[in-house]
């Protein structure tokens, strides 16, 4: 800070000193460091204060053979200062070497360090890191500014607190048999491959341009803008997601894929939606055929969900079926859910596809305000999966039976509250606390207020919170307003929601109490 300490030197008249101090005070007092956390109750190591990101423009020059980012790789961030900033931080792992940092076109100094506190006592778990940037001059509150970070090197997958892999994962069907990358970023993997304000509350538009060998397919979020042959054996493919997106939903996968593109119609509003399916080319033909058959159901699933939740919220829809058995899960990457397959090849089952597509509304368009609200994402997706399986595919497990089955599980499974997760990031994907219990809570709500009000509530959530975020308090308030209940029954509904989301034991209240 440029404090005017020199004004106190010598015999200067008090009036002159006062004038100097008054003149200099706004410049010195108006700028301060942005916070290095957004205070997330589960992962306080990520998120940064003092600014709001408006868009990311990422340029990757990628060699899939060596799994390295080459010269020319950089990320441009356009943000708005929410305070006067003397310096600010980004979430970015230390595996990648930085070639330079600019703020508003001028060179800026920077430093790197592990985030605090320690994420896990397990030495295998990746510790999040911070890139702290000091611009040449302070950034005024309310001003827009740009940051360019140029970098290169080999991105490393992040090991989560539950020891699963995420981020920029090298796509290997078996050890030594690798053909590019598979990007799944929940919860913090985005910072393994681009600097960001890596918290779901700071959503932004994203453009990704990937230069890779021309024989490879480079995939991004949203719509493909262009693919340019560079005449040197490489091609640059540009994708743009024009709806705000949480960083954990970004896509950057590169590999050898069989690609199918087409269109579908959203029957709720008549919109024509481009579709995109990418299946790992190296997979056994039978597996690839099975995935292609599943992908053909995307229009049916999207329209089923659109009738329940409102029109499809994005410009494109599709899936990526890779062959990366080490990952072992699917993720609802915005506009293109990603499926990692298993040891036998690419794999997409209908139930999981319905689950991931439902996230496009509940989780992607409406994102959690913080990581203790992940129950919102997974509760709706679990409910949707059960509903689709029963109503469309004739599964015996009805939503009512699902509620009953969840309510009857053993007491030991009720000890983790969905909206608390014991404050432990290792519980972020707990099967009961994050998936089944919130899914059953939603089914119970449907039974309490009836189909008409329940699905009107789902539509209202998307109208009010689409392309934004939702907190537990906002969800509860919206549910109570939509319920049509009054007096004692409304208070009882509030208790029902508190018990199902906050109690560390089996709730007492069920739909039969209404």
Image (cartoon, rainbow, N blue to C red):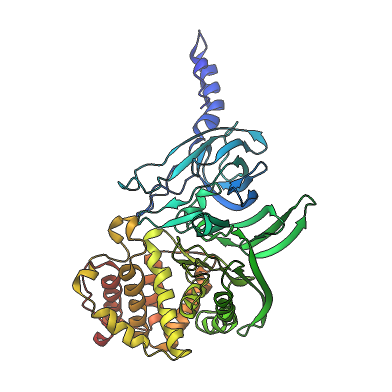
- Residue for point 31% across, 71% down: 432
Residue 466: x %, y % from top left: 53, 69
Q: Nearer the viewer, residue 268 or 482?
A: 268
Position of 175 compared to 507: left or right? Answer: right
Q: In this view, does 77 lie above or below 463?
A: above
Residue 257: x %, y % from top left: 63, 66
Q: Nearer the viewer, residue 29 or 197?
A: 197
- Residue for point 74% across, 61% down: 226
Can residue 323 be seen in the rendering of this structure? yes
Q: Which of 407 and 1 is in front in this view?
A: 407
Q: Nearer the viewer, residue 341 or 220?
A: 341
Residue 153: quadrant of the picture: top right
The residue positioned farthest toward the right in the image shown: 231
Can residue 197 be seen in the rendering of this structure? no
Residue 316: x %, y % from top left: 63, 71
Position of 512 compared to 447: left or right? Answer: left
Residue 248: x %, y % from top left: 50, 58
Q: Is residue 130 above or below residue 169?
A: above
The C terminus, quarter of image: bottom left
* Tally of marks: 0
- Residue for point 65% across, 80% down: 264
- Residue for point 61% across, 72% down: 317
The residue positioned farthest toward the left in the image shown: 411
């Amino acid at each position: 800070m440029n404090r005017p300490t020199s004004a106190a030197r010598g015999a200067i008249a008090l009036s002159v000193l006062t004038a100097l101090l008054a003149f200099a005070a706004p410049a010195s007092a108006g700028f301060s460091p942005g916070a290095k956390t957004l205070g997330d109750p589960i992962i306080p190591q990520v998120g940064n204060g003092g600014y709001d990101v408006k868009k990311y423009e990422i340029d990757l020059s990628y060699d899939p053979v060596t799994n390295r980012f080459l010269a020319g790789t950089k990320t441009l961030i356009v943000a708005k200062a929410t305070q006067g900033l003397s310096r600010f931080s980004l979430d970015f792992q230390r595996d990648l070497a930085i070639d330079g940092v600019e703020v508003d076109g001028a060179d800026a100094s920077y430093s790197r360090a592990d985030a605090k506190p320690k994420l896990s006592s397990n030495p295998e778990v990746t510790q999040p890191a911070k890139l702290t940037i000091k611009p040449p001059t302070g950034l005024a509150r309310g001003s827009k500014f740009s940051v360019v970070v140029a970098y290169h090197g080999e991105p490393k997958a992040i090991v989560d607190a539950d020891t699963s892999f995420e981020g920029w994962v090298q796509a290997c069907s078996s050890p030594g048999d690798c053909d590019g990358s598979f990007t799944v970023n929940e919860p913090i993997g985005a910072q393994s491959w681009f600097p960001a304000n890596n918290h779901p509350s700071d959503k932004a538009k994203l453009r990704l341009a990937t230069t890779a060998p021309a024989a490879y397919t480079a995939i991004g979020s949203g719509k493909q803008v262009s693919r340019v042959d560079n005449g040197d054996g490489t091609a640059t493919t540009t994708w743009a997601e024009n709806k705000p997106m949480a960083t954990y939903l970004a896509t950057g996968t590169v590999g050898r894929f069989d690609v199918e593109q087409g269109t579908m119609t959203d029957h709720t509003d008549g919109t024509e939606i481009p579709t995109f399916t990418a299946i790992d080319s190296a997979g056994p033909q039978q597996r690839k055929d099975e995935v292609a058959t599943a992908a053909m159901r995307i229009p049916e699933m999207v329209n089923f969900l659109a009738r329940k939740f409102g029109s499809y919220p994005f410009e494109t829809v599709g899936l990526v079926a890779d062959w990366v058995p080490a990952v072992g899960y699917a993720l609802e990457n915005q506009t293109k859910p990603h499926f990692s397959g298993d040891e036998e090849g690419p794999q997409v089952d209908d139930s999981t596809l319905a689950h991931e597509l439902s996230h496009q509304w509940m989780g992607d368009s409406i994102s959690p305000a913080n990581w203790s609200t992940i129950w919102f994402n997974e509760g709706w997706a679990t409910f949707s999966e059960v509903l689709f399986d029963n109503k469309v595919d004739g599964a015996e497990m009805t939503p009512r039976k699902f509620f009953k089955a969840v309510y009857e599980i053993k007491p030991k499974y009720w000890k983790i509250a969905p909206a608390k997760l014991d404050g432990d990031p290792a519980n972020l994907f707990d099967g009961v606390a994050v998936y089944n219990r919130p899914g059953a809570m939603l089914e119970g709500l449907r039974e309490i207020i009836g189909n008409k009000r329940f699905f009107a509530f789902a539509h209202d959530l998307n109208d009010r919170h689409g392309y934004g975020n939702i907190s537990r308090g906002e969800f509860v308030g919206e549910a109570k307003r939509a319920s049509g209940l009054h007096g004692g029954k409304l208070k009882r509904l509030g208790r029902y929601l508190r018990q199902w989301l906050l109690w560390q034991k089996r709730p007492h209240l069920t739909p039969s109490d209404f």
